[in-house]
Image (spheres, grey):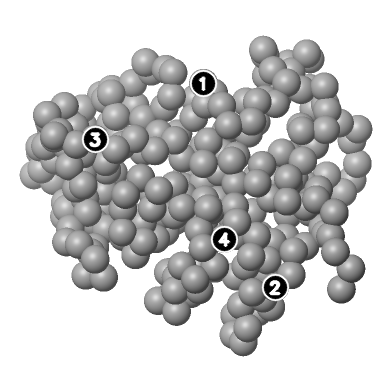
Amino acid sequence: MGRPSKSSGPVFTSRELALGAGLTLRNFSLLHEEGLAPAATTGGGGRGGHRTYQSPALAQAALIGALHLAGLELMVAARLAAAYAEEMGHQRGRLFSNIETYLQAPHNPRPGYRPWTFSPDDQTSDDFWIHNRLTDSVVDYLTGVAVLGDMIMVIADNTYVLTQHHGTNIKIHSPVSGGLIASPDYRIVGRGSAAQIVPITDEVDSLDFSVDPTSAARFKALEVEYLTAHENAVSRVRINVSLAIRNAFDRIANDRSLPRKAA
């Protein structure tokens, strides 16, 4: 799959995505064969080494790796990560790495100011680009450490998927219930290659709750079901999505800093 990249920029090879995700090359190739790998920017066909990816794909791969590490079957992990990445793409533009928390106190001596010299070529919308600037700056960047506000995925009894945030008691807004301790998001139905990831929003007829009280009541009942399952779960798996992404950034940055053998 492609030789190690000497680039420091936010373009990645297949090998780097597997490395960042903590997946074997074999498993990453299997995801491609099954159509479940993150989308490549270039090189959709041919040898895997010819594919390149951007930072959102790396973040998605990192989540796949974290879910697989947590015990989910690879294909289920990939489907859940894809659903999460798509939804977060609509909401935030990308999966939430929380890297920008390092621009604030107590990590940044000048909270709110970017600790690098401005350039017209800055790519401040790219989390890996920001990561590279932060790790070579006055910012106290902490490798492998959870920080306030990290996005947390919780899976109750291998079925109910909810979202929380690390280190905060701020409630998550619900359109029908006010503030919730966690956001009910997905239901995992089935196992193995037949598993489906069903968004909670797909379990109601309409999201226009102001004109459809039946759907509003149904949605509220689903929230109660998810939160009850969370509270009474026999098994509860917790994945720090943001930290998994930052860890992937760290692995690739460290790998790129290693000396390369001559071809």
Tell me where residue 100 appears, x and y as whole percent.
Answer: 65, 31
Residue drawn at x 36%, y 61% as measured from the top left: 74
Mark 3 is surrounded, within 10 Å at the Cα level, by few (under 14), some (14 to 19) or many (20 or more) other residues, namely some
Marking on residue 18: 4
Marking on residue 241: none
Instruction: Determine the CA span between mark 2 and mark 3.
Output: 38 Å
Q: From this viewpoint, is residue 94 visible?
A: no
Closer to the chain start, of discs 2 and 1, is 2
Taking the image as shown, residue 24 lies to the left or right of residue 129, namely left
Q: From this viewpoint, is residue 136 visible?
A: yes
Tell me where residue 31 appears, x and y as whole percent.
Answer: 44, 70
Closer to the chain start, of discs 2 and 3, is 2
Marking on residue 2: 2
Closer to the chain start, of discs 3 and 1, is 1
**Identity, as a three-letter code, of the amino acid under mark 4:** Ala
Instruction: Determine the CA span between mark 1 and mark 4.
Output: 27 Å
Kindly indicate whether the residue at mark 4 contacts the one at mark 1 (C-beta within 8 angstroms): no
Kindly indicate whether the residue at mark 4 contacts the one at mark 2 (C-beta within 8 angstroms): no
Mark 2 is surrounded, within 10 Å at the Cα level, by few (under 14), some (14 to 19) or many (20 or more) other residues, namely some
Instruction: Determine the CA span between mark 2 and mark 4.
Output: 11 Å
* Residue designated by label 1: 148
* Residue designated by label 3: 236
Residue projecting furthest to the bottom: 46
Residue drawn at x 84%, y 60% as measured from the top left: 260
